[in-house]
Image (cartoon, grey):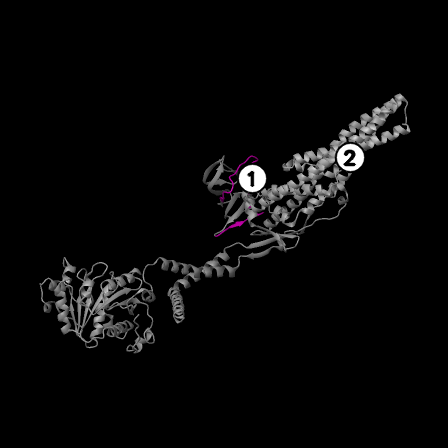
Amino acid sequence: MEKIEEIISLIDNKEKEDAKNLIVKHLKKWPWFVAFCTLGVIAGYFYTQNSPNIYQVKSRILITQEEKSMSSVLSFDKQMMSMGKNSNIENKIGTLRSYTLFRKALTNLKWNYSWYLKKPLYKADLYNNDPFELVIPPNGINANNIFVEIENLNDTEYKITAKGTTLQNGYSQIINIERIVQFGEPFANEFFNFTLNNKYETPRETYLLIFNNINKLTSDYLTKTNIELEEEYSDIISIAIDGEIPQKEADFINELNSVFINFGVQNKNENSENSLEFIDSQLSRIKKSLSVAEERFSSYRKNNQVMNLGQEAQSVYSKLEEIEQEQYLTQLQIDYYKNLQEYLDDSKKIEEMVNPSVIGITDPNLSTMLSKLMDLYSRREVLSYSVQDKNPTLILIEKEIKISRDGLEETLKNQLKATESKMISMQERYTSIQSRLKKLPETEKKLIGIQREFDLNNELYTYMLQKKAEASISKASIASEVQVIDAALVEAAVLIGPSLLVNVMAGFISGAVIPFVFIFLISFFNNKIETREEIERNSKIPVLEGIVRHKYKAKLPVINHPRSGIAECFRGIKSNLNTILEQPGSKVVSINSLIPGEGKSFISSNFSVILTKSKKKVLLIGADLHKPTLHKFLGVEESIGLSNYLKNEQKIEDILFPTSIPNLHFIQAGPIPANPSDLLDSEKFGQLVGQAREIYDYIIIDNAPLLLVPDAILSSDFSDVSLFVLRINHSHKDQIKQINKIVNFNRIKRSAIVINNAPDRGYGYGNKYWKKGYGGYKHKMSIA
């Protein structure tokens, strides 16, 4: 349990340390954040000052469903009213959002072209404020959606520039026009045909003219128009548009409302018109039959001197008249059912069907189902213009159409079967009456036939006249289900932008995010060591306190600035090594790096100087026989050195030179040999170190980079401790693992890592106090 708690504690500490490092990493770049945030605020202010005002224009409409009206009491118009009752508020919103209605509204407004004033950051709409009179010939064709730049040069001429791509005759055409044209002169070519007249004393500005494409304009307004319920269970729909010109948006919304209202009324009128056309066709046919029957009836009575029928004849006549009228209406109903069955899948044909009540069908279920199917077909047609086939709303309507169609088809089958049975029964009654008719005298039989034909046509004509009157009343009483509560008004427009506060805050936040992203990306793709913690986390050997980053230009700052923070860093390394090397006597320290530029020679020379401050005799050996630079730090000229000794060209005393620093002697590398590694692998180098141990307290060996040559491995056999230098923001992260492998594979007993160019973590009371006499403060050095 204790181990688990210990692991959890370690994880928490690691997360806290990582978070701390992340914060510190970003805080180091605070000038970036200040600069970008300042630029963001300035950009936000500039954008606000150079952006057009944005207004919200709004209209509110009420969707009503009248339950009672003068026409609702007539059987003819009951199904018409049921259409409104079955249309819910969502259907109305869907219809109002349709591409068809938007396109119709824009077509009515005749926005064939638009003028803009060119501004630095935007185009100012000049709605109803044309800078020039534009004259387009009757057959003139102009390329759509290409901004034509009009620069007013003077009162007589202008410069026209047009660049872009347009479709012409089915092919893409490139437009590149730049000309100076006289006002009043036609500008005609293969892409444009118009004339500009300067009648308004237009200022000498640059204007933009665009010939609108109705389809693109429709799509733009579909995108920018917000149509929604005002409240969840309300019947009020709000229509809002955000735009630069309140008058323009108000004109569009009001026209859209008008088109929407007319659309609903037009659908009802079409149904009534179909019924009236049917009734008129029947009246025309019956009128002709009635005239013929009336002439025959009058002539027969006159020629046969028969005025009235006998009692039996009158009875037979009444029954025949009744049954024939029923047969006529029943046959109309049968034909209606069959036609309706045939047109179930044809949305156009089914819309032309008359109301069932016109031919005496009073079944409310049939009327309701037919109305619903007609409404669904209408909704599908409207949506098909603005959505694709896989749109969820369209798919749902298709499913509803199938359900309604199947239900109506089943109802029609049952009704047709019942009506045909009724027709058979009436035929049997008709046959029975005909048998009674045959028993009457010949004169009465003929009179009955003639009178029956006349009365039947007369009653049918009267019946149709009555239905026509009902249909006319119904058509006259049709009212829209849509009422405009609040029309779109310029006076009611609300200024909603641009907001200075929002834009400035957006600029500030963007300014803070951009450097954060940059730093993150740089860190993500950076494979170099950035913090001490990265080394401590991955190293398997001790990590000594680092050499802090400094701004001194001197090669040996520990001499010129003995009380500085960097001098104390080297004193700290000395204390650390005394802890690691507890044995008495001379101590050999091998200082290594894996790649050039990590500061190995800088640390070797300055560390040697610090050791001499304790009255210790120190020997500094330049063992980098490939590219020696150590002599530059001590300010001596290149001369004979270690390579000469290893080749038996010189003795030890010949290559051993004193320096200007007391107690410090120096053996430089000497001339670069052809085989440096072989020379270091000889016994002579071991003899050199052995003899030096008898004379010096410390022997510092400055080796060549390990990843380039193996010389440092050879010298480590003679060292008491091997120090590996890693430089922040220069050494690669993989080098830590390389050091672990080198130490493990070569079985180096004592080793540690020295961090160069480490961030100043504070020594004593901070770096500023080193200048105030606190240079002797003893700081704590940690060994990982």
Q: Quadrant of residue 438?
A: top right
Left or right: residue 360 compared with residue 343: right
> In this orientation, does residue 561 appear?
no
Residue at 56% x, 39% y is: 135
Residue at 82% x, 33% y is: 322
Return the mark for residue 455.
Answer: none
Distance in Å between CA atoms under marks 1 and 2: 56 Å
Pointer 2: residues within 10 angstroms few (<14), some, or many (20+)? many
Left or right: residue 352 compared with residue 544: right
Amino acid type at mark 2: Met
Q: Which residues are magenta?
A: 121-149
Give the mark count: 2
Left or right: residue 356 compared with residue 149: right
Residue at 21% x, 77% y is: 614
Q: Are marks 1 and 2 in contact (CB under 8 Å)?
A: no
Image x and y of residue 21, in percent: 38, 66
Left or right: residue 145 compared with residue 638: right
The quadrant of the picture occupied by the C terminus is: bottom left
Q: Quadrant of residue 440?
A: top right
Amino acid type at mark 1: Val
Image x and y of residue 705, in percent: 22, 61
Quickly name the residue at label 1.
135
Quickly name the residue at label 2.
464
The quadrant of the picture occupied by the N terminus is: bottom left
As drawn, 495 above or below 423: below
Q: Is residue 139 magenta?
A: yes
